[in-house]
Image: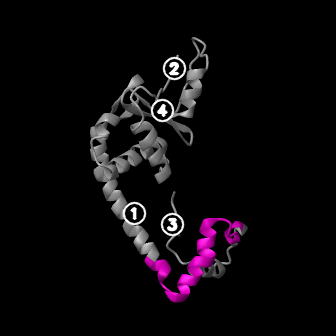
Amino acid sequence: IARPLLKVEKRKLIELVESNELTFVQDDSNKDNRFDRNFLRNDVLTVLKQRWPNIDTSIAKSADLLRQESDVLNEYLAEDLQEFTGCGFLDIECLNITKLRSIGGSKRNLLLRLFLQEKTGIYPGVTLLEQVNVQIFESKEDQQPKVKFGDFTICRHRGLMYVIPELFQTLSEQDINSGEILKLTDNYYSQMT
């Protein structure tokens, strides 16, 4: 998501709009404090700005530094992640649980988070990582646990962890007529006949 005006102060944006006689649309939902982001913006930040007038600038700088550090960390983790990934059933990229169990909890969680984010496009939270650690990593070897994550299912088979999209699961349950061509956009099949 590109947000080119994120660092521009609201006051400056309003001045720009007014000086150029542009139409300005205010989203009414921005005033609704039932949404956490609005409560923070409308109530919490207002109080903090009274005490520290430049707090929004400080928060933006801190967030930018954290993003930079996260980017660098992810570059290193991406290199390490290659050691723990491979091709499993149907040449689907998967995570080797047996190897990953051999490293510490924090690094394992970071690698697990990166793998899940790469496969789903969704940044997994702490609760999901805890579920995966308990159900996928710690369940008995003869079990085949599954964890639902958005439109994906995380499952384990023969010491490997797979992230399977819902579309793939739906297709495996359907009868596919011989001779028909089915084109898919995910990384599991480009064409089935």
Type of the residue with mark 4: Pro
Indicate left or right for 80 with 48 as reference: left
Q: Determine which residue is flagged by label 1.
A: 67
Name the N-terminal-most of marks 3 and 2.
3
Q: Nearer the viewer, residue 109 or 165?
A: 109
Q: Residue at x 55, y 88 (%)?
A: 50
Cα gap from disc 3 to disc 4, whole angstroms: 43 Å
Q: Determine which residue is flagged by label 2.
A: 192
Q: Nearer the viewer, mark 1 or mark 3?
A: 1
Q: Determine which residue is flagged by label 3.
A: 4
Q: Determine which residue is flagged by label 4.
A: 145
> Hey, which residue is sitting farthest right in the picture?
28
Which percent across, then down, holds residue 158? Answer: 37, 26
Cα gap from disc 2 to disc 4, whole angstroms: 28 Å
> Hey, which residue is sitting farthest front in the picture?
140
**Label 4 secondary element:** loop
Type of the residue with mark 2: Met
Cα gap from disc 1 to disc 4, whole angstroms: 34 Å
Instruction: Give the magenta-colored segment's residue range.
Output: 29-58
Name the N-terminal-most of marks 1 and 2.
1
Circles 1, 2 touching at the beta carbon (< 8 Å): no
Name the N-terminal-most of marks 1 and 4.
1
Q: Residue at x 61, y 13 (%)?
A: 177
